[in-house]
Amino acid sequence: MSEERIDISVIIACRNEAAHIGALLESLRECVKVAGKTVEVLIADGMSDDGTREALTHFQPGFPRLTVLPNPGRIVSTGLNAAIKAARGKVILRMDAHTNYAPDYIQRCVETLESTGADNVGGPARTQAQTFWGKVIATAYHSRFACGGARFHDGDYEGYVDTVPYGCWHRETFDKIGLFDEALVRNQDDEFNLRLTRAGGKIWQSSAIRSWYSPRAAIGPLFRQYFQYGFWKVAVVRKHRLPASWRHLIPAGFVAANISLLGFSSLAALLDWHSSAAFFFLSWLAMITVYLAAAVFFAFVSAGKQWWM
């Protein structure tokens, strides 16, 4: 008996996602129905201890071609790689446990992959928040000022980009570029896309590919999340000797400017160079004033777009 032909392999890495896994699988079930192709789903569970594995086991009998894989590495990159190695589809499509998807998500990804000839495709990172702080964080998430103009934060943008959320690839892409870097706890997708573009590959974002990410709902978890992003972006820069995008250097440049101006001002004051000390301090004060004014202005602009219009 010949092996079943699989057109699309959906890969997901998760750990301790009991609060989201049910909604993900319900959303995914609709995507598979609309896709019109044979789809398998491979979920690599990072040894969850919050009931995620039990929820997956509960869904398996009624979910054709759902396979749950162990991910003893417990991080996203090891989970995705385990799923890619087990995948049988000609197209590999990544999804995330913190996201809900439009019923035509898989269909749109595959159509865009074929029609554009790109090596990786995806949709913008739209958000869906329920709490007050979740909505505040989602508003900042879509601000060009807060995010440095990253295209994937713009729900209307369509065209070539340097990265997209999640991703959809022909399987041969992994044969050429390799798998995700398992040394990276975060930013493994940015690093993979950097390798892809440096090898001449193209990445396309389509606004027709619709999904809704659930952002953190409190400042503390958000701080930890973005601290990790910043930490692991440094690891990507060290590996490749250049950033995945030049916008990643702006925060470091801003911090360096603050330290330099205040340092020079303090040094000049110690040496009794009063005019120089005043110049550096006033330069720092002007920079901070401009920054705070811009932050307030763009906060109102973003709030107007997201909440009041």
Image: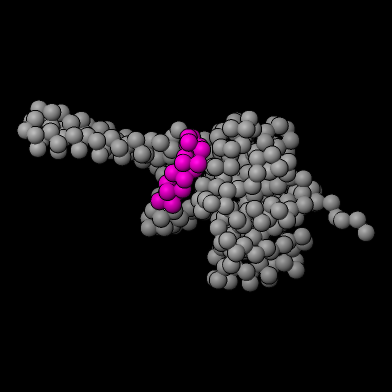
Residue 167 visible somewhere in the drawing: yes
224 w.r.t. 269: above or below: below
Q: Is residue 197 above or below residue 56?
A: above
* Residue 30: image location, x then y, percent: 71, 54
Name the residue at the right extreme. Answer: 1
Where are the magenta residues, as a range?
Answer: 227-245
Q: Position of residue 59 (x, y in %)?
A: 69, 67
User: Can residue 20 be seen?
Assistant: no
- Which residue shows up at 61% across the image and 36% down it? 196
Name the residue rendered at 69%, 52% in the picture: 84
Residue 281: give x, y in percent of width and height: 16, 34
Question: Which part of the image, by quadrant, shows the N terminus?
Answer: bottom right
Image coordinates for residue 183, horizontal then vertical, percent: 53, 51
Q: Please name the residue shown 72% across and 62% down the image.
A: 67
Q: Is residue 219 magenta?
A: no
Quadrant of the drawing holding the C terminus:
top left
Displayed quadrant of residue 97: bottom right
Q: Main secondary structure of the magenta part?
A: helix
Instruction: Pick the residue in front: 248 or 104.
Output: 248
Residue under the point 57% across and 68% down: 48
Q: Nearer the viewer, residue 16 or 30?
A: 16
Magenta span includes 240: yes
Q: How many marks?
A: 0
